[in-house]
Image (spheres, rainbow, N blue to C red):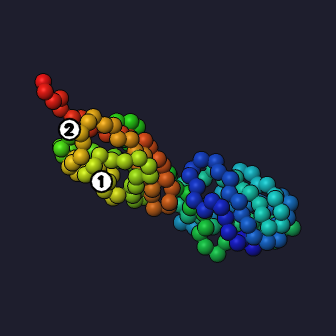
Amino acid sequence: TIGSISPSTITNAQTAVTITGTNFVTCPQVEALNPSTGIWYVADSVSFSSATSIVATFTLSVDATYKLRVENPDGLAVLSSSNILTVSDAPTFSTAVGSLGELPAGGSTAFAIAATSDSTITYSKVSGSFPSGYSLNTSSGAITGTENAATSETVFNFTIRATDAESQTVDRAFSIKVTVGMNNT
């Protein structure tokens, strides 16, 4: 039987997938079936851990959801009842790492962060802080607001995470500099 797999979502790069179940024997064959095309893909390699755990390494170039089939050398086999392995491209940022620009104290400027994937992306701030009065639009990646607390020049450093519909993530560090005009000049 096939009970579960980990991870259940992989990219197109060669990836090891642990399959847990029952009655595995040494050197089973593992295949992935793309139900949309009917094409079977044999695992690059399979290592036997125990009667309840094997590790299959796949390089699947087609983004899809797959059923898995395990066949023992004696011919006994199992096919997962549902598509349990998702192959999906992880998000990638199109906005360069580093400074997004400057903002004058008390000013309003919009900053844009963008990432792409094969599914819908949401954005979140995982560390750091924005200038006072600014917030992140989790759907568009826009950082907008009106700065309302600067008394001296400050660089705000933060990390944004892009997450796609398959829960794949990528983090990138950014900064925004708040400038304050010179007094008594």
Sequence-wise first label, 1 or 2: 2
Residue 55 position in % (x across, y down): 74, 57
Residue 10 in view in this figure: yes
Q: Which kind of residue does numbered mark 2 sit on?
A: Pro
- Where residue 135 is drawn, which disc sits there? 1
- Where residue 104 is drawn, which disc sits there? 2
Residue 115 position (above or below residue 73): above
Which residue does the image show at 76% across and 55% down from the upper left?
A: 46
Furthest residue to the left?
Answer: 185
Q: Quadrant location of the N terminus?
A: bottom right
Q: Is residue 165 left or right of residue 84?
A: left
Q: Quadrant location of the C terminus?
A: top left
Along the viewing direction, whichever of 48 and 121 lies nearer the viewer: 121
Residue 144 position in % (x across, y down): 25, 50
Residue 53 position in % (x across, y down): 78, 63
Q: Which kind of residue does numbered mark 1 sit on?
A: Ser
